[in-house]
């Protein structure tokens, strides 16, 4: 693993792909209605400087389009957004969509009927570009979570009648502490069964009493979206920097020539990263890293 002082950037254009949660913004308490959902000033300044120098900044996140757009509404940055873990790519300033892929609805309905999950209570959430469908609207914690975003429409999901394929899907599983090991084993079986079409993984943190199982299209992830963007703008693969902390950042950090793990990231991510930041997401970890990386270019 290299230290930041060993980095030596070139005079060519770069693509910098950055995760949002636990990377670009401070820790969020999703169980708190007043959670702070803002980018620190230090992070804004480095992104602005890189963009003005002609580099491409990609915000690579599992968040929906509306959720991530709100972070940048009052910030004049010409960023590229890769949402839903690489399934939706857009340029907000130009109102342009570059990629829009969905999940096979038949597979999602099969998972909902899996005998392995019958004993657990769960709430299915389908996420689309600018709205979300929730199976159980009486789940107050979940309803309040999505109500935080004023431009985000919330509708009732009737899985049996649903015909529109979502871009991303969550299952909020009510799991007791003593059942968590069992549900992780079930996840491994589901991952093996749906390996050809779906990516399944659990969030780092629970929301209330629920473990969050995220389901995405197997063909797309953050790394595939980054390669798509790099090809569009003729940026060399070796000139890609990726920064993240969680399992959905795995491919982009493992495959990038300059894969960067946040010091507050999962051990699995830090083990595969080329670099680890000196500071965490609460202390401008991204800007400290990038300033060191590009200091010889100024």
Image (cartoon, rainbow, N blue to C red):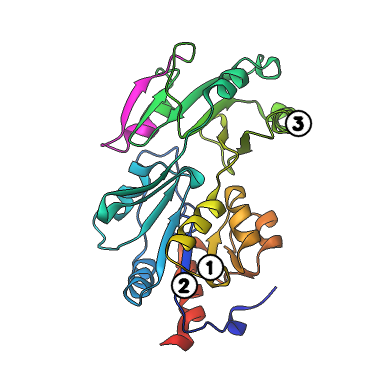
Disc 1 vs disc 3: Cβ atoms closer than 8 Å? no
Q: Is 143 rendered above or below residue 272?
A: above
Disc 1 vs disc 2: Cβ atoms closer than 8 Å? yes
In the image shown, does 107 or 34 lie closer to the viewer? 107
- Choose top left, top right, bottom left or bottom right for residue 146: top left
In the image shown, does 26 or 73 lie closer to the viewer? 73
The x and y percentages for residue 5 are: 59, 84
Q: Nearer the viewer, mark 1 or mark 3?
A: 1
Q: Which mark is residue 250?
A: none
Q: CA distance from mark 1 to mark 2?
A: 8 Å
What residue do we see at 51% from left, 45% from top? Answer: 85
What residue do we see at 26% from left, 54% from top? Answer: 94
In magenta segment, residue 3? no
The x and y percentages for residue 158 are: 44, 14
First reached walking from the N terminus: tag 1 or tag 2: 2
Residue under numbered circle 2 = 14
In magenta segment, residue 151? yes
The x and y percentages for residue 111 are: 62, 21
The local crowd at label 2, few if under 14, some if 14 to 19, many if 20 or more residues have their Cα within 10 Å, is many
Q: Nearer the viewer, mark 2 or mark 3?
A: 2
What residue do we see at 44% from left, 71% from top? Answer: 287
Q: Which mark is residue 241?
A: 1
The x and y percentages for residue 121 are: 58, 18
Q: Which residues are magenta?
A: 144-158
First reached walking from the N terminus: tag 1 or tag 3: 3
Residue under numbered circle 3 = 185
Secondary structure at numbered mark 3:
helix
């Amino acid at each position: 693993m290299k230290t930041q002082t060993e980095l030596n950037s070139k005079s060519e254009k770069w693509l910098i792909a950055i995760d949002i949660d636990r990377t670009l913004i401070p820790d969020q308490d999703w169980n708190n209605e007043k959670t702070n959902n803002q980018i620190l000033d230090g992070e804004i300044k480095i992104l602005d400087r890189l963009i003005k120098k002609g580099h491409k900044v990609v915000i690579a996140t599992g968040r929906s389009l509306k959720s991530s757009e709100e972070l940048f509404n009052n910030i004049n940055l010409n960023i590229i957004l890769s949402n839903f873990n690489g399934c939706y790519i857009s340029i907000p300033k130009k109102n342009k969509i570059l990629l829009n892929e969905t999940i096979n609805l038949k597979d999602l309905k099969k998972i909902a009927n899996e005998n392995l999950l019958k004993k657990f209570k769960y709430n299915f959430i389908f996420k689309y570009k600018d709205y979300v469908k929730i199976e159980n609207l009486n789940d107050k914690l979940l309803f309040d979570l999505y109500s935080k975003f004023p431009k985000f429409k919330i509708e009732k999901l009737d899985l049996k009648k649903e015909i529109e394929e979502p871009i991303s899907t969550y299952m909020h599983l009510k799991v007791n502490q003593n059942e968590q090991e069992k549900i992780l084993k079930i996840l491994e079986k589901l991952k093996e069964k749906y390996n050809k079409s779906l990516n399944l993984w659990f969030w780092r943190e629970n929301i209330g009493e629920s473990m969050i199982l995220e389901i995405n299209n197997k063909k797309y992830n953050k790394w595939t979206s980054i390669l798509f963007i790099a090809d569009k703008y003729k940026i060399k693969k070796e000139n890609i920097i990726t920064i993240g902390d969680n399992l959905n950042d795995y491919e982009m950090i493992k495959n990038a020539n300059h894969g960067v793990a946040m010091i507050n990231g999962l051990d699995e991510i830090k083990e595969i990263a080329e670099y680890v930041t000196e500071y965490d997401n609460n202390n401008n970890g991204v800007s400290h890293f990038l300033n060191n990386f590009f200091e010889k270019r100024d």
